[in-house]
Image (tube, rainbow, N blue to C red):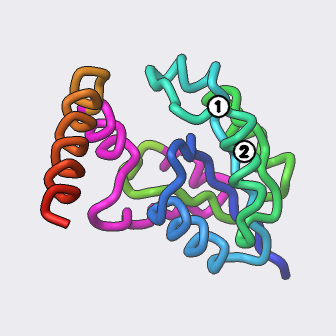
Amino acid sequence: MAKTVLTYGTFDLFHIGHLNVLKRLRALGDRLIVGVSTDEFNAVKGKKPVVPFDQRIEIVRSIKYVDQAIPEENWEQKRLDIQRYGVDIFGIGDDWRGKFDDLGDSVEVVYLPRTEGISTTEMKRVLSAFDERHVEQLKRTLDSISQIVKELS
């Protein structure tokens, strides 16, 4: 019998960790449905994605491991989607460990380990250091290096 796997996420600044979790989730079943959090729902969660929802869901839809991508609009949707799509396994990253155990009364709940050394939160932290002043300083430094290289050539 075919198994359907369901997961959710923001998938902002899509990276190898996202791809790894989708690949591992797809390996658990025959069909993978991915709920992508809307910008409005992210605001409720206190998140502000860099990449707009329409682009994030299009990226997720393009991943070969994903059979269907749907908008995630609220917390309650998970239980409704489990019924709507006949889900057998709910899977998500282990940074959510314990948060969705209540779904275990209707599906198998699986928490997958994160990919070491990569996270959207860390990427955003690093990128935030590049404000206008720092970019200008970097540009001046690169211009100086370029001038030195010209003079040495």
Image position, residue 90 (x, y; %): 62, 58
Whole-Å distance between the Cαs marked 1 and 2?
A: 9 Å
Highlighted magenta segment, given as a residue range: 100-129
> Is residue 48 shown in magenta?
no
Vertical arrangement, residue 75 with respect to residue 143, above or below: above
> Viewed as shown, does residue 93 lie left or right of 79?
left
Nearer to us: label 1 or label 2 = 1
Q: Nearer the viewer, residue 137 or 87?
A: 137
Image position, residue 126 (x, y; %): 27, 41
Q: Nearer the viewer, residue 50 or 46?
A: 50
Q: Nearer the viewer, residue 95 or 151?
A: 151
Amino acid under label 2?
Ile
Q: Residues within 10 Å of mark 1 (few under 14, many from 20)?
A: few
> Viewed as shown, does residue 141 lie left or right of 62?
left
Which quarter of the figure is the N terminus placed in? bottom right
Residue at image mark 2: 57
Q: Quadrant of residue 52?
A: top right
Residue at image mark 1: 52
Image position, residue 5 (x, y; %): 70, 64
> Is residue 110 shown in magenta?
yes
Amino acid under label 1?
Pro
For image coordinates 74% across by 64% down, the residue present is 66
For image coordinates 56% across by 46% down, the residue present is 11
Q: Secondary structure at mark 2?
A: helix
For image coordinates 53% across by 42% down, the residue present is 12
Q: Secondary structure at mark 1?
A: loop
Check contact, mark 1 vs mark 2: CB within 8 A: no
Which quarter of the figure is the C terminus placed in? bottom left
For image coordinates 58% across by 35% down, the residue present is 51
